[in-house]
Amino acid sequence: MKITLIRLGKLHLPFAQAGFDEYSKRLKHYVKFNDELLVVTSKSKEEASIKKLEGEAILKKIQATDYLVLLDERGKSFSSPGFAKFIEQMQLKTNHLVFVIGGAYGFDESVYARANAQLSISEFTFSHQLVPLIFGEQLYRAFTIIKGEPYHHS
C-alpha cells in the first residue's frame, strides 16, 4: 500500500518541519510514504473563494481509485491502537490511502463530497503548523503497533 499526505501550505516552524521530516523518514521503513505540499495563492480574501481554489487543487491530485481521508475536526476519533487497526484494514481495502490536511478554513464542499472518510486527530484545535508533525507521529506509531514493536506502550 502507498500512503500520501497532502497538505496545504509550508511549515514555517523549523522544529515542526524537522519533526515531520523525522517521522516521514521512519515511515518509509513500513510503507511507501509520500508528502505532497500544495501552495495555493488567492487574490481573494473571501473564505469561500479560498476554499474553492484549495479544493480544486486537492481534487486534481486525487485518482478515482484513491481512498481519501480528510483530517477534519468533525471526523471520527481513534485511540492509537484503534488507528492502527484502521490502517491494517485499509491495507486490505486499497492500494493508495490519501490523507489531506486542509487549509485554515477547512475544506470546500466538493472535497467533502469526494472523501471516503473523515478523521479527527484530537478534540483540540491545532495550528496547521503542528498537524503534520502530530499526524506523522501517529501514523508511525500505528505501524509500530501493527508490527508489534515496542514504541507504543499500552
Image (cartoon, grey):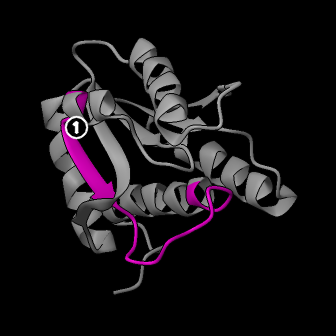
Which segment did they paint magenta? 114-131
Which residue is found at the position 21% from the left and 49% from the top? 88
**Viewed as shown, does residue 13 lie left or right of 70?**
right
**Viewed as shown, does residue 7 lie left or right of 66?**
right
Check the image and report above or below for 117 versus 54. below
What is the secondary structure assignment of the residue under circle 1? helix
- The quarter holding residue 73 reads bottom left
Residue placed furthest toward the bottom: 154
**Viewed as shown, does residue 24 lie left or right of 152?**
right
Which residue is found at the position 62% from the left and 56% from the top? 128
Which residue is found at the position 37% from the left and 18% from the top? 62
| Quadrant (top left, top right, bottom left, bottom right) of the N terminus | top left
Q: Measuring from the top left, give residue 16's x and y in whole percent.
A: 74, 59
Q: Measuring from the top left, give residue 83's x and y in whole percent.
A: 28, 62
- The quarter holding residue 42 reads top right
Q: Main secondary structure of the magenta part?
A: loop
Whether residue 126 is in magenta: the answer is yes
- Name the amino acid, label 1: Gln
- Tell which of 41 and 138 is nearer to you: 41
Q: Which residue is mark 1?
A: 91
Which residue is found at the position 61% from the left and 45% from the top? 24
Residue placed furthest toward the right: 14
Check the image and report above or below for 89 versus 84. above
- The quarter holding residue 149 reads bottom left
**Viewed as shown, does residue 26 lie left or right of 152?**
right
- Tell which of 38 and 135 is nearer to you: 38
